[in-house]
Image: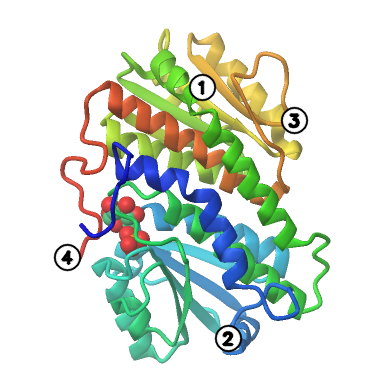
């Protein structure tokens, strides 16, 4: 490959390290001459014209889409549905009158997502692709493109592209909200810069995540990731990362839902990673942790500064409540990475997986 690992043992580690830089690049790429965040006028118009957004994606990009829904609904007041591309194509829901379709795809080549784009174009609806690869198939074939500016991602397990997707979706939602005169009371540019610094802090203390991986996952057969609200979306991505590269069976759950069945799987020592970044539900998720701990689980609370408590295993830097996924996903990526290393797995090229899947 022409993309060098340099002194890094794995692309994945290099790409995780690049995440603060990626966020700073996104700020620059979407900054106008006056220093405000901006997106192309025709993309803004398409977002303003839509009565509902349909986000279509697969894998990690789907998980970024779940966060994007929160952004467009909470900042811009636009209803959003998020769909798995391989399902949507064959089981299309009823559509609103003025839908805009947003395809989130790192590679821009995923066949499952492309087949939806082809169908949607036949129906004549407007389309936007959010991708890392300019000139990719889904970028060329959609009406509009928003670029991730993450640089080439080589490791099969997506890390920096996820963070870029979340950041670019935040920018698009924020710019739309401002244009619509919605009251967004923060300066996203500044908040993204703070998040970039927060990620850097976590990256600079990787050893802590290596210890956690060793402590919780060395002999684990399975693991759970729980969170509520936006933390639930991130817990799905945390579980996927662990499965992909360490082959430990993992599931992400809404904190309150685990007790409705899956808690039956909790045994003595079962690792449960719990994200606590949202003040409004922090007591609820802490209650869910107590429920699993009472059944013998080995809980690892990852809390954001400001909502942390004594005994939390990891405290991550405080960022804007909507931007917590940018920061909270990073310890989960690193825990997965070290768990995979301990098991001598091929971190960059996990078995059975491809970087981009160009067959349906
Ligand atoms: C593959 C990769 C995943 C990725 C998914 C969607 O399955 O292994 O890491 O999330 O495709 O890829 P895309 O390029 O469309 O984001």
* Mark number displayed over residue 359: 4
Q: At numbered mark 1, what does the secondary structure look like: helix, strand or loop?
A: helix
Q: At numbered mark 2, what does the secondary structure look like: helix, strand or loop?
A: helix
Q: Which of marks 4 and 3 is nearer the N terminus?
A: 3
Which residue does the numbered mark 3 point to in the structure image? Answer: 307
The quadrant of the rendered image in which ligand 1 is seen is: bottom left
Q: What's the CA distance linking mark 1 and mark 3? A: 20 Å
Disc 1 crowd rating (10 Å Cα; few below 14, some 14-19, many 20+) is some
Residue in the image at 46% along x and 43% along y? 17
Q: Residue 286, relative to residue 353: is it above or below?
A: above
Disc 3 crowd rating (10 Å Cα; few below 14, some 14-19, many 20+) is some
Looking at the picture, tell me which residue is in the foreground, 320 or 20. 20
Q: What's the CA distance linking mark 4 and mark 3? A: 44 Å
Q: Which of marks 2 and 1 is nearer the N terminus?
A: 2
Which residue does the numbered mark 1 point to in the structure image? Answer: 208
Q: What's the CA distance linking mark 4 and mark 1? A: 39 Å
Q: Where is residue 3 in the image (x, y as percent from the top left)?
A: 28, 57
- In the rendered image, the quadrant that contains the C terminus is bottom left
Disc 4 crowd rating (10 Å Cα; few below 14, some 14-19, many 20+) is few
Q: Earlier in the sequence, mark 2 or mark 4?
A: 2
* Mark number displayed over residue 145: none
Which residue does the numbered mark 2 point to in the structure image? Answer: 46
Looking at the picture, tell me which residue is in the foreground, 112 or 15. 15
Quadrant in the picture for residue 10 = top left
Q: At numbered mark 4, what does the secondary structure look like: helix, strand or loop?
A: loop
Q: Residue 161, relative to residue 328: is it above or below?
A: below
- In the rendered image, the quadrant that contains the N terminus is bottom left
Looking at the picture, tell me which residue is in the foreground, 152 or 354. 152
């Amino acid at each position: 490959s022409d993309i060098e690992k340099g002194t890094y043992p794995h692309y994945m580690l290099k790409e995780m390290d690049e995440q603060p830089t990626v966020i700073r690049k996104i700020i620059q790429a979407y900054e106008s001459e006056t220093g405000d965040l901006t997106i192309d006028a025709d993309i803004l118009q398409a977002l303003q014209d839509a009565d509902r957004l349909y986000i279509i994606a697969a894998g990690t990009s789907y998980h970024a889409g779940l966060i994007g829904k929160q952004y467009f609904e909470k900042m811009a007041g636009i209803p959003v549905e998020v769909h798995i591309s391989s399902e949507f194509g064959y089981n299309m829901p009823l559509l609103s009158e003025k839908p805009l379709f947003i395809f989130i795809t790192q590679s821009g080549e995923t066949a499952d997502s492309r087949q939806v784009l082809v169908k949607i174009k036949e129906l004549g609806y407007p389309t936007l692709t959010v991708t890392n690869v300019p000139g990719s198939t889904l970028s060329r074939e959609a009406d509009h493109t928003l670029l991730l500016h993450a640089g080439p991602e080589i490791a099969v397990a997506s890390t920096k592209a996820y963070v870029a997707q979340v950041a670019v979706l935040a920018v698009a939602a924020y710019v739309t909200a401002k244009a619509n005169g919605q009251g967004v009371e923060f300066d996203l540019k500044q908040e993204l810069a703070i998040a970039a610094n927060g990620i850097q802090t976590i990256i600079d203390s990787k050893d802590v995540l290596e210890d956690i991986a060793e402590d919780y996952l060395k002999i684990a057969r399975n693991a759970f990731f729980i969170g509520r609200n936006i933390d639930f979306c991130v817990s799905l991505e945390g579980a996927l990362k662990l499965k992909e590269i360490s082959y430990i069976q993992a599931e992400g759950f809404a904190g309150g839902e685990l007790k409705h069945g899956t808690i039956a799987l909790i045994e003595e020592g079962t690792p449960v990673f719990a994200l606590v970044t949202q003040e409004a539900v922090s007591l609820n998720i802490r209650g869910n942790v107590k429920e699993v701990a009472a059944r013998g689980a080995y809980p690892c609370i990852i809390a954001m500064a400001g909502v942390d408590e004594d005994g939390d295993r990891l405290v991550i830097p405080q960022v804007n409540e909507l931007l917590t996924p940018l920061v909270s996903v990073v310890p989960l990526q690193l825990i997965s990475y070290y768990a995979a290393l301990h098991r001598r797995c091929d971190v960059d090229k996990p078995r059975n997986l491809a970087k981009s899947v160009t067959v349906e």
